[in-house]
Image: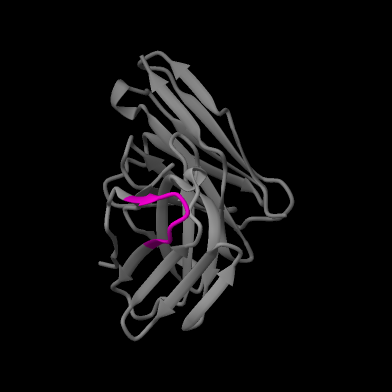
């Protein structure tokens, strides 16, 4: 149980375009989902906490207008990288809790902005 | 600032040996402790979690928790080359505020 599905696994886009990443909890309802970013050989960096039916809580230094998060249902959260630039190229990972810990992670999305 | 610290490594052990991974945390209110394994280019996968002081064993893995010393460790017995990965320590307070350490790279040499 507690499967988190993330899509797409890889995406290449041109600078200036927007990219949407989906995170779904397949067999449980997730009132809270977390979005992380990871650069090569670096640790996970929490970007924001996504709360169903309300605004996301962003970590300090994360631009909320650039990284739009929508958590419209108990099983789906989306992260949209708007006006992407090469420096946004990274590995984005979502996670969710099935009521109690631990965190369950999606498979991640490798974003490359050309 | 809640912090979780780990030795970044790399930690190299020969195949068949015991690998010992250590983690310290700053928030005394932390209640839940997790070890995740992350292969290069992949997302983290849960190895073990521990909530109470003492040892918890699962197959070749043993998690050890000492809340007084704010210390949690992971032992991997009979290490295999397939165990080569980055191991992330994470702590949480009642399912909120997960804080991850920087990870320790483990290399098991055949």
Vertical relation: A1 (above or below) A79? below
Residue A56 in view (yes/no): no
The total of numbered circles placed on residues is 0
The quadrant in which residue A100 appears is bottom right
Task: Name the foreground residue: B51 vs A82.
Answer: B51
Vertical relation: B16 (above or below) A4? below
Q: Position of residue B62 (x, y in %)?
A: 51, 69
A79 is within the stretch colored magenta: no
Residue A38 in view (yes/no): yes
Vertical relation: A85 (above or below) B82? above
Q: In the rendered view of the protein, which quadrant contains the N terminus of chain B?
A: bottom left
Residue A31 placement, left or right of B32: right
Vertical relation: B25 (above or below) A64? below
Q: Position of residue B99 (x, y in %)?
A: 38, 61
Task: Name the foreground residue: B77 vs B57.
Answer: B77
Task: Name the foreground residue: B64 vs A101.
Answer: B64
Task: Name the foreground residue: B102 vs A60.
Answer: B102
Task: Specify the segment rendered in magenta.
Answer: B12-20
Residue A48 placement, left or right of A4: left
Q: In the rendered view of the protein, which quadrant contains the C terminus of chain B?
A: top left
Q: Position of residue B100 (x, y in %)?
A: 38, 58
Q: Residue at x 45, y 75 (%)?
A: B64
Q: Residue at x 46, y 28 (%)?
A: A110
Q: Residue at x 50, y 21 (%)?
A: A11
The colouring scheme, among rainbow, by chain, secondary structure or one colour, is one colour
Q: Position of residue A26 (x, y in %)?
A: 71, 46
The quadrant in which residue A111 appears is top left
């Amino acid at each position: 149980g507690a499967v988190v599905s993330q899509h797409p696994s890889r995406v290449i886009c041109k600078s200036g375009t927007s990219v949407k990443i989906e995170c779904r909890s397949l067999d449980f309802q997730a009132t809270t989902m977390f979005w992380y970013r990871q650069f090569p050989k670096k640790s996970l960096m929490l970007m924001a906490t996504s709360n169903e039916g309300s605004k996301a809580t962003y970590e300090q230094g994360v631009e909320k207008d650039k990284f739009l998060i929508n958590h419209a249902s108990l099983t789906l959260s989306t992260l949209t990288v708007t006006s992407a630039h090469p420096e946004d190229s990274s590995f984005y990972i979502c996670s969710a809790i099935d009521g109690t810990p631990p965190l369950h992670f999606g498979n991640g999305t490798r974003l490359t902005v050309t | 600032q809640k912090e979780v610290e780990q030795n970044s490594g790399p930690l190299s052990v020969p195949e068949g040996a015991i690998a010992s991974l250590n983690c310290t945390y700053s928030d005394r209110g932390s209640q839940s402790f997790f070890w995740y394994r992350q292969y290069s280019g992949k997302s983290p996968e849960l190895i073990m979690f521990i909530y109470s002081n003492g040892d918890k064993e699962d197959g070749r893995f043993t998690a050890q928790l000492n809340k007084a010393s704010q210390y949690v460790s992971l032992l991997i017995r009979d290490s295999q080359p397939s165990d080569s990965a980055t191991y992330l320590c994470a702590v949480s307070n009642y399912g909120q505020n997960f804080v991850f350490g920087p990870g320790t790279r483990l290399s098991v040499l055949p």
